[in-house]
Image (cartoon, rainbow, N blue to C red):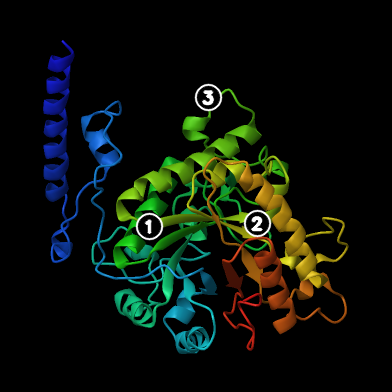
Amino acid sequence: MHNGKRITMSIVFVFLLSIWVTAGFILADEEDQSNNEKMVSLHKVKQLMGKDIELPEKLARFTFQSGFQFNYPDAVRGVYVTGHSAGGSRFEDLLNLIDSTELNAMVIDIKDDHGNLTFIPEEGSPYEDIAQNFIKDPKEMLEVLEDKGIYPIARIVVFKDTVLAEKRPDLSFTKNGEVWKNGKGDAFVSPFQKEVWDYNVELAKKAAELGFQDIQFDYVRFPEGFEKRDKELQYDQGDFKDLELNDVKKRVEAVTDFVAYAREELAYYDVDVSVDIFGYSATIEEAPGIGQNFSRIADNVDVISSMIYPSHWTPYFGIDKPDQEPYRLVTEYMKVENEVLGNLDEPPLSRPWIQDFEAPWLYSGPTFQYGVEEVEAQIRALNENGVDEFLLWNAGNSYTEGVDYTPLD
């Protein structure tokens, strides 16, 4: 009986494997057949054959091949790059900055803070109407990065999306029949809406197909202070409506489920999935309004990028003016994050966002300046706490010159 069962299981396995391979060829994209033929990943086979099918994890996984060869650096040390900069004259300045320093990566806007795609997609794409011609030829841009050994990360802003909210108010938050906007004039779409999930995940797949090695999701949350206005806004909780959870927990479920879903959908593309998250989320059980639970998000990503800009903290960790004590702020924060990540079975890589800008809104008089000393202080604090990777944020992409980006080497 046992021998018969083994023979039957072997036949089933061979049958499933043949379907897996065949399905992969059927789904091959004609435009990419000059590269390795596309094949579906294991989770696609499970979708075809039923979710209860168990396939060996040690089978060779056939993944998408973009044709680019990017090597992961010793440690990612990157800068933020807008679509304007990536497609304009500043791009050369940023290339020169990286060539002349220990920096080695770029985080490039693919879907920006307004909800625009930063390049023109193929004709007939469902994203044509949100496209801006900032990056004239993304493939050519990636060829330059490949040639220079610069690691490419695609930034996709998810739930902060004025363009989609105004186009589809039913996917957003409304008040008195109008799309609600925050004090800065930004609108958000709802993390409860799975149509919004797919809208962003499909864009992420396009970025992976272009050749980006890491998909970084930003604004993976509800609007700030949502817990103070959720009762006055109209919105659909979708599949989360009937969960036996309070509204705070429902928001956490929606955000966490999106991250898990995105990672599963991107498995075929063999890219890292990273998420930007408020640093203070690591210091509390969960952020009640925005739906971010640090541990649960971290459990579903390859890279976690905490935004730990000193200027963005009110008095915290016993520090009265965090903006003026970057070394101390980052040191105290990393103690907390290391503890939280240390409690996870398979913690993601930590790659925090740090500050290379001034915060004039904090001061009525002269603004505390960020220069070489302040940037290096943050990097040193990270290194001393076991973190070698970081990303520099400056909204205008103008970064401090003369910084030693490996101060402990």
- Quadrant location of the C terminus? bottom right
Q: Amino acid at mark 1?
A: Val
229, 336: nearer the viewer? 336
Instruction: Please tell me how crowded label 1 is: few (under 14), some (14-19), or many (20+) other residues with Cα within 10 Å.
Output: many
Instruction: Please report contact status of discs 3 and 1: CB closer than 8 Å, yes or no.
Output: no
Q: Amino acid at mark 3?
A: Asp
Instruction: Please tell me how crowded label 2 is: few (under 14), some (14-19), or many (20+) other residues with Cα within 10 Å.
Output: few
Q: Nearer the viewer, mark 2 or mark 3?
A: 3
The residue positioned 84% from the left and 74% from the top of the image is 363
User: Which disc is residue 242 wearing?
Assistant: 3
Q: Give the quadrant of residue 344.
A: top right
Q: Which residue is mark 1?
A: 271
The earlier-in-sequence mark between 1 and 2 is 2
Report, in whole angstroms, how far the alpha carbon at label 1 lies from the one at label 2.
Answer: 33 Å
| Residue, far top | 1
Q: Secondary structure at mark 1?
A: loop
Q: Nearer the viewer, mark 3 or mark 1?
A: 1
User: Which disc is residue 182 wearing?
Assistant: 2
User: Which disc is residue 377 wearing?
Assistant: none
Residue 270 seen by the camera: yes
Residue 126 coordinates in the image, percent (x, y):
30, 57
Q: Secondary structure at mark 2?
A: loop
The earlier-in-sequence mark between 3 and 1 is 3
Q: Amino acid at mark 2?
A: Asn
Residue 24 coordinates in the image, percent (x, y):
16, 47
Residue 108 coordinates in the image, percent (x, y):
46, 71
Report, in whole angstroms, how far the alpha carbon at label 3 lies from the one at label 1.
Answer: 34 Å
Q: Is residue 77 left or right of residue 145?
A: right
271, 407: nearer the viewer? 407
